[in-house]
Image: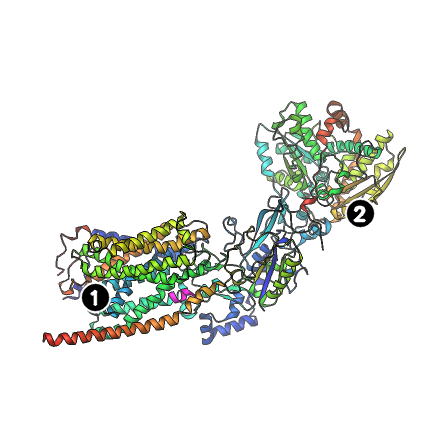
Amino acid sequence: MSKGVLVDITKCIGCGSCNVACKMWNNLQYNQTAPEKGSGLDAENWTVINRVETEKNNEPVWRFVKYQCLHCEEPACASACFSKAIKKTKDGPVVYDVDLCVGCRYCMLACPFNVPKYEWDKTFPRVRKCQMCAGRVYTGDSPACVSVCPAGALTYGDRNSLLAIAREKINSDSIYVKQIYGEKEAGGTSWLYISDIPFETLGFRTNITTTPLPHYTESILSLTPAVGLGWGALLTGMYVYNRRRNEIANEKEKPDKE
Amino acid sequence: MDDHVKEDEQQLNKQVTRRSFLKLMGGLGLAGITMSLAGCSNSSTVEQAGGDGWLPQQYQGRGTWPAQVRGRVPIDPDNPSITRDDQKCILCGQCMEVCDNIQTVAGHYGLPLANDVICVNCGQCTLWCPTAAITERDDIQNVLQFIQDPDKHVVVQTAPATRVALGEEFGLPPGTWVVGQQVAALKRLGFNAVFDTNFTADLTIMEEATELIKRITGEINKPLPQFTSCSPGWVKFCEYFYPDLLPHMSSCKSPQQMLGALAKTYYAKSKNIKPENIISVSIMPCTAKKYEMQRPEMISSAHYWNKKGLQDVDVVLTTRELARMIKQQNIDLSKLPEENYDSMLGEGTGAAIIFGATGGVMEAAVRSAYYFITKQQPPANLLNLTPVRGLEGVKEAAVDVPGVGAVKVAVCHGLSNARQVLDAVRQGNAPWHFVEFMSCPGGCISGGGQPRSAVPPSDEIRMARINSLYQADARAVRRESHENAEVLALYQDFLQHPMSELAEELLHTKYTDRGKKIKEITV
Amino acid sequence: MAEKDKWHFTMTPTRYVLLVLGLVGVLMMVYRLVFGLGSATNLNDQWPWGMWIGFDVLTGVALAGGGYSTALLVHILGIKKFSPIARSAMLTSLIGYLLVMAGLFMDIGRWFNFWRPFVSWGYHSVLFEVFWCVSLYTLVQMLEFGEVATEKVKKGWHGLFKKILPALLIIGVLLPTLHQSSLGSLYVIEVGKLYPLWWSMLLPVFFLMSSFFVGPAMVTVETMLGARAHGHKPDISVLQSLIKVSGYLMLVYLVLKIVDLAYRGATGLVFTGNLEGNMFLLEIVFGVIIPIVICFTPQLRNSVGGLVTFGVLVVAGVILNRMNVVFTGMADFMGGAYFPSVIEWLVSIGLIALGVLGYLFIVENFHILPNHKLDQATIPIDGVNSKTSNIEMSN
C-alpha cells in the first residue's frame, strides 16, 4: 500500500520539531543564510515551516505551513529523469539515487511544486529533496518529521485511509476549507493537506493541473515508435524512388551523349 | 574520553551487517554490476535515500502520534525573552515536559492558533534544556553600548533572588549570599548608580497591602481574593487562560517596573538629570521581565514628563547574563569586596528580601497589613509565617488580625498549581482574601534567568537559595516594609501616600485580556 | 605532394582572435569542470537551466537543423540543384552538434556520469530520447563526414563509406526529426509553468518545423558569409529556391500557431502589452511574418539584400523563440533572477570560436565548397582583407 502523510494545518503550532528531526535523520547542515525567496527549501532544508500572517473573519491569524516534497503519485521529476535516478517506490516515497544521477536538473524544471534543489556549491552536486525517510517507511516507521510532531498536525498512514480521515474531518468540522490539497493536484500526491484557510492564501499552488504530469509527455513519447518507423520507411522509400528516377534519367541521357 | 567514543563508533561501522554483506556480494557479480549500472537495484536506492543521520530514541520504533512523542515547544523568533538554537536542539522533549506538565502552557490551549505563539515567557524551558539550545535573549551588547555612552546615566537594579544565585556561576555553593560583591561588580562594570529592587519590593507591599485593605473594607469595588502581580509570567498566564479573573489581580506593578518608573521621575528630578539620559537596567532572575519591560503600558515616566519614547525600564539582564558580563571583564566575583547600594532607591527590608521565595510576598504583605490595620507591630509568629514557606505546591494560612478576624491567604508557585487555585476561584469556592502567585516553581530564586546549577532544577538547590533568603531576613534590622526609611521618604517627598494619584500613575497598571489569543480546548 | 604539405591553415588576425577566444573558453571549461557549476555559473535553484542549455544546446541544435533539412532535400528527395550547398550545410550541422555535445557536457553537474542513460534507461523521459538521438546523430554525422574525409585521408576506406552512406543519410534525417521535436516536448511537462503563449501540446511540432525552416535560412547566411570570406559569387538561384521551401513551411507554421492559440483561447494574451506578449509579437512578426513577405515578393527574394535579410531574420526569430521558451516564458513562474556569468559567456563564445575555426580548417582542407577544388587549393582568408590576397597558391 502506498503510504502518505496528512498535514492538518489547523493543528500546527510552528515548533519546528519536524525541521530539526529532518536535519538530524538526514544529516543535513544548518546554513546561516536561509533562503528568503520562494518556498524556503534548499539543498540542506528539505522541509520548512513558513509562517503565513493572514486574516480570518477579519481577525489576524497566523498559520504555520509545513512544506516539503509532496511525493506525487505519478511524479513529474521521476518521469523527467533520463537515467532513472529518481523513482517512486512502492511505499510512496519518491527517492533519489545519486549514483545514477547525471546532473541535468530536468527534474528541477519538471517539478510542478519547485521542490528539488541543487548543491550548487559542490563540484559534483546532488539533487536534494525530501525522501520521505524511505528507509524508515520501508521498515514500517513513520518519516522522521511525523514521528516528532508534538501537536498531532502530521498523520502517517495509507494514503487511502488518510484521504478517508481527511474527508471525514473536513465534512464534520465547519472550520475546514472543503478541499484536500494533494488529492487531485498534479494527479494526486502522497502528502495531503487540510486547512481552515484557503490554500491559495497559504502559498500553495492551486492553479495546477489534475492530470498527472507524466501523462502529457507520455502521450507524445508514445508516438515516437510509430513516427520513427513510419518516417523511416517513408524516407527510405523516397530515397529509393528518387535514386531510381535519377538513374533512369541518367541512363536516358547517356545514349544521347555517347 | 572522546577518543574512546570515536573508536567505538569506528568499530561499529566496520562490522559487516548481513545487508551490507549481501549488497557487497551482489555488487561483485556480473549481474550485480549490470543491475547497479542500470539502476535496477531498488534496495540500494531506499538505503541511500537520506537517513544517514540519527534521531533520538523516543522517536524510533513504529509508534505513531501521540505515543512517545515529545517534540518541543514553539518559540516565536521575535520572543523578547528566549531564543533557541536549532543546531543544539536534540528534540529531547524536556522543554515540552516543563511547559506542558509544570507550567501547563503548551498543550493547554485549543487550535488553530490566533496571531500569537502562546508563551508566558517564564523561561523554565531554558533551565530544563539539557543542551542549552534554549537560552535567554542576550541583551548584553545593549547594556555595554549604553555604559560606553558618556551622555547616558545608567542605573541598575538587582532583584532579591539574584544575590543568592549569582555566586553559583563563580563556583560558590548554591545559596551563597553575594549581595555586596554583586554591587561591587556592577560598579566595576561601569553602572552609574546601583539600586536595589528590594526598595520597590517594600514599596509594592505598601501599595498592595493598602489595596488589599481597601478591597476588604469595600473602599474599592474589586473582588476578593486579591492576586499578587509581581510575577510577569504569572500575569500573562492569567491574561491568557483566566482573563475573567483579571479583576482579582492587584493593580500594582511589579517591583522592577516601579523602580524603573521612579528612576526616571523621582530620582531624575532630585538629581536633576534629564529623564531621557537615564538608562534603566535591571538584573533579574527572570526571562519574563524582558517581556514585561516592553509591554506597551510600561511607560509611566513618558506620561509623567509628557515625553514620547521614554520607557520605564530599558534593558533587562538575567542573572546568567550578568555573570557572563562579569566574566567577560575578567572580574572574579568571589574576590570582590562588599559594597553598598546607592541611596534613594537602595534600601530594602527583610520583608523585601524574601520576595525572591515562594510565600515571601505573602509573608511580607501580612506583616505590613497587620500593622496598617492594627497600627501595632505584628507578633513574632507573623515574622516567621511557616505555613507559607517551603516547596509545597499550594500553601494556605489564616492570620488572626485583631478587629478584622481571620485573614485567609494562599500561596502557589508553578503555574500548574496556580490552576488549582484559579479554578477554585472561578467556581466561587475560594475562602481566601489574598493569594500569592509565582510563575516559577520555588519562586524567583528558581526563575528562568537563574544559573543552571542543576538541569533540570533540583529542589535541593531551590531550598539552598530559599534558606539563604530567610536567613538574611532573620538577620535584618528592619523586617517590615513600612519601616523602610527611604520608602517613607519617597512618600513624604514625592508620592504623599499609598495609592495617591501620583502613586496610581507611576506604580499601578492595567491588564490585557488575551483570551482571544487562545481557543478553549474542545475534544 | 609531401606529407607535411597536406594540411594548410593560414592564420589571419581574425583567426588569432578566434583562437584566443577558444583557448580562454577551454580554460574556463576546465575551471567549471574542476570547481563545479555554482562557482562557474549564475545558475541557482530558481533557474536550474540557463545560457548553456538555452542557447548552446536548444538554439544550437535548432540552428544546426540546416544539416538534416538539406540532406532531406538533396539526398532523399533528390533535388539536385541544392547539392552544391549540401556538404557545407552538413558540415555546419556536424560542428554544431559537436558544440552542442560540449555545451551539454559543461552543463551536467556530475559529468563523469554522462554515460548513465546509455545503461540506465529512463525511457519515459523526453530527455532520454533527446540524449540518444543527439548522441547517435552526432555519430552518424561523423560517419557521413567520413565519406568526405576519406577523399583525402585513409582513401582505402572511401568505398566502404560510399556504400553505407545511403543508410547513414536516411538515419541522419530520421534522428533529427525525432529529437528536434523532442526538444519541444521537453517543455510540455512545464504545463502551467511555461507561459501559455508558448506552452502547447504542439510544442514538438513547432520545434520541428522551426528547426526545418531555419535550415535554409542558416545556409543562406553561411553561404553569404562564406562567399564574402572566400571572395566568390554566391549562387543566388539555389538560395532563392531554397528559401521558398522555408517560406511555405513558415506559412504552415504561422497558421498552425494562430490556430493553436485560438484553440487554447490564448490569443488575447498576445496583445496584453506585457513582456511576454511583446516578446511573442517580436518573435512572430520579425521572425516569421516579415520573412514570409520577403520570400513571396519576387523583387525582394531576387536581391542579395533580401536574401540576407530573410536569413538573418529567420535565424534571429528562431533564436528568440528558443530564448522565449527557456527564459521569457518561465520567468513569471520561476521568480528570482538569472543573468549568465562571465564564465558562461566565455565558454559559449569560446565554443563558437572553436567551431568557426574548425569549420574554416575543414573547408580549406577538404572538398566542401562547390567551386573550390582541392587540387587547386587556395588559402582562403576571411573578413575584410580577403579580396586582395585570396588567390595565393599554397605550394
Q: Which residue is mark 1?
A: C83
- Give the left or right position of residue B467, taking residue A245 as reference: right
Amino acid type, residue under disc 2 in the picture? Glu
Residue B303 in view in this figure: yes
Q: Secondary structure at mark 2?
A: loop
Give the magenta part as a residue range. Answer: C125-130
Verify whether residue C304 appears in magenta.
Answer: no
Q: Secondary structure at mark 1?
A: helix
Mark 2 touches mark 1? (CB < 8 Å): no
In depth, the one of A207 and A131 nearer the eye is: A207
Rendered location of residue C333, percent (x, y): 46, 53
Rendered location of residue B364, percent (x, y): 80, 36
Q: Nearer the viewer, mark 2 or mark 1?
A: 1
Please say which color scheme the image uses: rainbow
Q: Residue at x 31, y 71 (%)?
A: C171
Mark 1 closeness class: few <14, some 14–19, many ≥20 residues within 10 Å? some
Rendered location of residue B389, percent (x, y): 81, 43
Majority secondary structure in the magenta region: helix
Mark 2 closeness class: few <14, some 14–19, many ≥20 residues within 10 Å? some
- Give the left or right position of residue B112, taking residue B469 as reference: left
Q: Identify whether B193 is placed above or below B454.
A: above
Q: Which residue is mark 2?
A: B392
Q: Quadrant of the N terminus of chain C?
A: bottom left
Q: Quadrant of the C terminus of chain C?
A: bottom left
